[in-house]
Image (tube, rainbow, N blue to C red):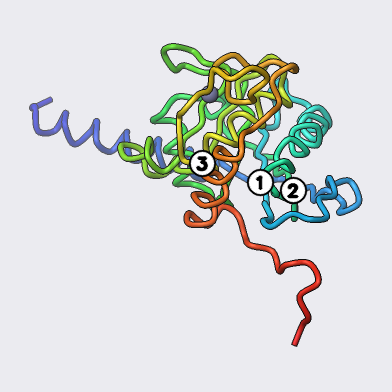
Amino acid sequence: MTPLLRFVAVLLLAVSTAALAAEQVRMVETRILPQEQLPAAANASHALRLSLYAFRGTRWLPADIVAAVLDALPLLAQCGVAVAGVELRLLETPLQFHFYSTPVARELMREITVAKPAVFFVDDTYSEPAYDAEAIGLTNARTRPELVNTIWFAYGARDLPFALAHELVHVLSDSGDHSEAPDNLMRPETSPANTRLTDAQCSRLRASAEANGLLARRAAAGTPRK
Ligand SMILES: [Zn+2]
């Protein structure tokens, strides 16, 4: 084969593989969590709608994901964030999408339409270093714009509810900052003992998330409606 023919053949193979992958990414189920299961936050100034994505055939069980998320969300109430809705979507995809790497995740995001912020529960990660979770805000999405406002959790992540809340704060605040303050949720190591957020952390979270369309401002309680 001439070099040109070989190039064309490789190109055609690449195109057909991508097309095949696209055809095989399907959303097979959507679970909308009932409103009465969502944590109440009577005086919240902002509301969050969270999208969760799991893959059929991985070790993650939808029930475990939902339980962890329902434990995580009350940690955001201290910032005046209520939960307006949580939806879990189950994807059926080729095996390659069950493992996080930046190029594969970018490809998946080109195949499906995702409401943000979105949390993906994958079987494992090929990232180096292999963090349990990767949170991609606006600032660290410059080289991977498809992944903006997504979080990727590998199976087996420790202290899942606290880790989920921690990563959500990173994305909502569009900040990779950590805190050394005792009990702070944003200490580098997540733990059930670290749950607090400071007023400054909450202010930044609300301002940034509202500006980036990740939180909606709620009507003030007691405001007369016209
Ligand atoms: Zn962190």
Label 2: which secondary element = strand
At 62% from the left edge and 20% from the top edge, which residue is drawn? 123
Total number of numbered discs in the rendering: 3
Q: Position of residue 164 (x, y in %)?
A: 66, 29
* Numbered label attached to residue 173: 3
The residue carrying mark 1 is 51
Residue 119 vertical placement versus 154 (above, below): below
- Tell me if residue 156 can be seen: no
C-alpha span from label 3 to label 1: 17 Å
**Residue 219 at x, y percent in the picture:** 71, 69
**The disc labelled 3 sits on which kind of residue?**
Ser
Crowd class of label 3 (few under 14; some 14 to 19; many from 20; radius 10 Å): many
Cα separation between marks 1 and 2: 6 Å
Image location (x, y in percent) of residue 46: 67, 56
Q: Is residue 174 above or below residue 97?
A: below
Query: Disc 3, ligand 1: is the CB inside 8 Å?
Result: no
Residue tagged by mark 2? 86
